[in-house]
Amino acid sequence: MLESTPFGERGSTTVITRREFIALAASYGATLALGGTASARSKVNWRERRDLFPEGVASGDPDSGSVLLWTRRPFDKGERQMLTVEVAEDERFRRVVAQARAPVSPATDWTARVLVGGLKPARAYWYRFTDRDGNGSRIGRTLTAPSADDPRPVNFAFVSCQDVNEGTLNAYRRMIFEDERAAPGDQLNFVLHLGDFIYEVVEYPDEVKTRYDRTIYEVARIPDGLKVGPFHIPLTVDGYRAVYKGYLADPDLQDARARWPFVAIWDNHEFSWQGWQSIQKAGKARPGQSIKVAANQAWWEYLPSRCKKVSGPSLESFDPPAVTNVAIEKWDENGLGDEPNNLAAINSLIGYRSYRYGKHLDLIITDQHSYRSADPFSDPAAGAFGPEFPGMFPEDVAQVLDGGRAFNGGNPPAEVSFNGAHVPNSQRNAPPHTILGAEQKAWFKDRLRNSTATWKIWGNSEGALDARADPQNLPPGLTKETWPKTTYATFVIGDYGMAYRERAEIYDLVRDAKITGFAIVSGDRHSFWAGYATSELPPGKFDPVGLSFVGASLSSAGTMEAEEHSFPKTDPLRPLFLADRPDGAKPDWTHNMLVKHGVRSCLEYAKSFDLQRARSLSNPNLAPHLEFVDLGGHGYAKVRLAGNEMRTEFVCIPRPIARSERPDGGPIRYRVLHTAALWKSGERPQLKTSVLEGDVGLSI
């Protein structure tokens, strides 16, 4: 019977054997449970004791026949203990379909992972864990993926950046509240978490009381950590574990993980704020191979996923590779550190993977930090260009630095210049900048090229939309230095928005292979963006090949919050970022208008507050790729994929500096819907943006 069960690894409909399924569980480091026909009611003497399962329960990475389940049950005794996990077709466990033993031990900080197979596609299941004394976890709910030929629409949310040290997770409560009241066909199938599940930079409330208008909340005390400014930073697995436990104490995060399966990828803060590969950086860069391994281990222990650990076959523990923190002195032709400890550290957990979810979704997930090359924009000499223009950098110089030795067909300039100032081209002999790395990029392109789903969704932690300004259109005399008429400015974000060469390589593949239904969902920017995937902007050729979205942070502070508190009121360019009202009310966020419409619109709005007149002065060549931008947004995004269209809804909430006591998580600032019909090869995608409720300010 088991040999004919379609376990459907990663959404396929391939039939695999019991032995193959056990091997699959081993590769993910999970205990195995096999489902089957519903039997009688549970015979386990379960009584809920949430205090003994303090981080709740979770499920992750569902496919059409299996899903990973998770909990943490700490014990006082430092030895291996055994739990029982049950999976049922009903919330009262009258129709149990699977039951298995789940070991916990100090080796994994008392966490358990169980891979449950033999489940039916597109079904809701309930699960719970029980210790040998009958003490039970809360009951969790999970959902399997539909089969690969299921034509029904797919619904998911994407989220990122949930700093609970400085904020609260009201957005999850709003998401749960609305989903519980939605029609069955409109309810979410899963939550895609695009990184910064934790922030490894931890402030202590007794040392730092506030930042901006935010209270600093207790998260954790870091054992054996590093202190950099006000931040305590973990250096060991125990330090990272402490942070995860602090985050998972949040009740709204626990409720979300108990309601939906999560599909997750890390961003930077799961390892190191400014780090890359296995280099740890918080101010000063230092070798961090052991820290990268510790970060990967804690992520694997606390987020149930099908990310494959390559360090050992254990079903219970991560089995970290032994590495030494040594300087990387040799780099390969793609900028990857060719040092054994670095390679062992970054490959100790493989995050990139893909899932088929019904007929309409291929979700392709990439890792933006483990394989990327060094930051090409960090040269302080070039960073001194245009000091009067806050955050702006010459776009033409950025393209030179990004291209490295491959720029201009392999003939990069020896110098870069701005307004007559010349500095050596620091990237002249460096490889072209990569975020994906060669091996992951080849895998990604292959997955994209061979996808047969209606929609090919690239889930990554970093935004891909250009953030430009046109300071060349400023009136004379406003600044001492005049911005050159020959180039736009770009805001240095450090994501795919400035990865010009690598991004073009991917978009060219989409065009040349005649791929339709290509869209990007991303995070990290702490802001909402909606627009088009295009390799070039004017004066280059604007030729979009897909859609691109960035979701706002759940709680982390964003650009507008920082500018409200720190942008000098005497700066002559302040109207480009904040428009101060005569009545002393909160300033309007003209920074949104700056990247969407340009400097002339901002200056007019700051003078007259006439929105229609300001938009009439919009620069049409600045941002034809943008339909919406809100640099002050918080909340989440929902996606609905059908055979004929993609609908992306931004749900924006007020700044989450205190936990709402309302059952709905508090009020909504606005709700905006972006709709695109499926386009044919050679056609341009077209987004239609509609404000469903609330006030979007200067975001359109």
Image (cartoon, helix red, strand yellow):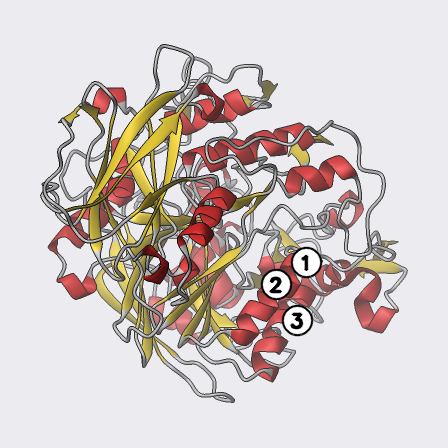
Left or right: where 136 falls relative to 29: left
Disc 3 residue type?
Glu
Disc 2 residue type?
Trp
Disc 1 residue type?
Glu
Q: Quadrant of the N terminus?
A: bottom left
Q: Earlier in the sequence, mark 1 or mark 3?
A: 1
Instruction: Assign a secondary structure to mark 1.
Output: helix
For the question of whether residue 448 can be seen, the reply is: yes
Q: Mark 2 against mark 3, which lies toward the viewer?
A: 2
Left or right: where 383 falls relative to 464: right
Query: Looking at the image, do the residues carrying marks 2 and 1 touch, with CB atoms under 8 Å apart?
Result: yes
Instruction: Assign a secondary structure to mark 3.
Output: helix
- Is residue 429 depicted above or below 686 in this figure? above
Left or right: where 114 falls relative to 288: left
* Residue 487, picture quadrant: bottom right
Instruction: Pinpoint residue 247: horizontal percent, then vertical percent.
Output: 37, 30
Q: Nearer the viewer, residue 439 or 157?
A: 439
Q: CA distance from mark 2 to mark 1?
A: 6 Å
Q: Mark 1 against mark 3, which lies toward the viewer?
A: 1
Instruction: Pinpoint residue 112: horizontal percent, then vertical percent.
Output: 38, 32
Residue topped by disc 1: 439
Q: CA distance from mark 1 to mark 3?
A: 14 Å
Residue topped by disc 2: 443
